[in-house]
C-alpha cells in the first residue's frame, strides 16, 4: 500500500498541465493570430545582451516553462 494516492496526484498534475499547456502553446504557435496589441508585437521585440539576441516571446516561453515545472513539482508533492 502506497503512503499516498497516485490517482489524486495524477489528477492534480493533469489540472496543472491542462492549464499550462495552452498557455505555453500560445506564444509558440502564434495562437488566435495575435497580430495586434502586445502579444502580436512580442516576436518583433528583441533584447540585446552583449552577444546574445533574445526575442521577448522566447523569454515569455522560458518563464512559462519554469512556472510549469514548478507547479508540476508542487502538484506531485504529497500533502499532509
Image (cartoon, rainbow, N blue to C red):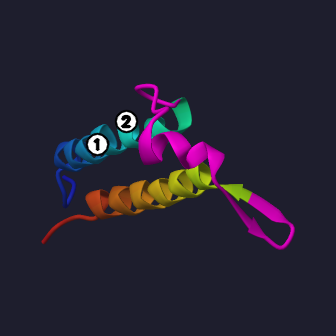
Who is closer to the viewer here, 65 or 45? 45
Residue at image position (33%, 59%) is: 71
The reply to whether callout 1 and callout 2 are in contact (CB within 8 Å) is yes
Q: Which residues are magenta?
A: 30-53
Q: Secondary structure at mark 1?
A: helix
Who is closer to the viewer here, 42 or 71? 42
Q: Residue 28's image quarter?
A: top right
Please name the residue that numbered disc 1 is placed on: 19
The tag on residue 42 is none
Mark 2 surroundings: few (<14), some (14-19) or many (≥20) residues within 10 A: few
Q: Is residue 62 left or right of residue 36?
A: right
Q: Is residue 75 left or right of residue 40?
A: left
Q: Residue furthest left?
A: 80
User: Is residue 77 positioned above or below 13 on the image?
Assistant: below
Mark 1 surroundings: few (<14), some (14-19) or many (≥20) residues within 10 A: few
Quadrant holding the C terminus: bottom left
Residue at image position (23%, 43%) is: 15
Residue at image position (28%, 42%) is: 19
Q: Residue furthest right?
A: 51
- Give the total number of marks visible in the rendering: 2
Q: Residue 7's image quarter?
A: top left
Mark 1 and mark 2: span between their CA atoms? 6 Å
User: Is residue 12 positioned above or below 80 on the image?
Assistant: above
Q: Residue furthest front?
A: 36
Please name the residue that numbered disc 2 is placed on: 22
Who is closer to the viewer here, 26 or 66? 26
Across and down, in percent, residue 35 comes to 49, 32
Across and down, in percent, residue 52 comes to 81, 64
Across and down, in percent, residue 70 comes to 40, 63
Across and down, in percent, residue 54 comes to 71, 58
Who is closer to the viewer here, 45 or 69? 45
Q: Is residue 70 magenta?
A: no
Amino acid at each position: 500500500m502506497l503512503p499516498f494516492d497516485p490517482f489524486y496526484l495524477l489528477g492534480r498534475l493533469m489540472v496543472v498541465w491542462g492549464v499550462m499547456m495552452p498557455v505555453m502553446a500560445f506564444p509558440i504557435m502564434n495562437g488566435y493570430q495575435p497580430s495586434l496589441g502586445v502579444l502580436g508585437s512580442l516576436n518583433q521585440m528583441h533584447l540585446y545582451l552583449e552577444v546574445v539576441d533574445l526575442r521577448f516571446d522566447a523569454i515569455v516561453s522560458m518563464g512559462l516553462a519554469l512556472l510549469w515545472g514548478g507547479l508540476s513539482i508542487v502538484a506531485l508533492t504529497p500533502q499532509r
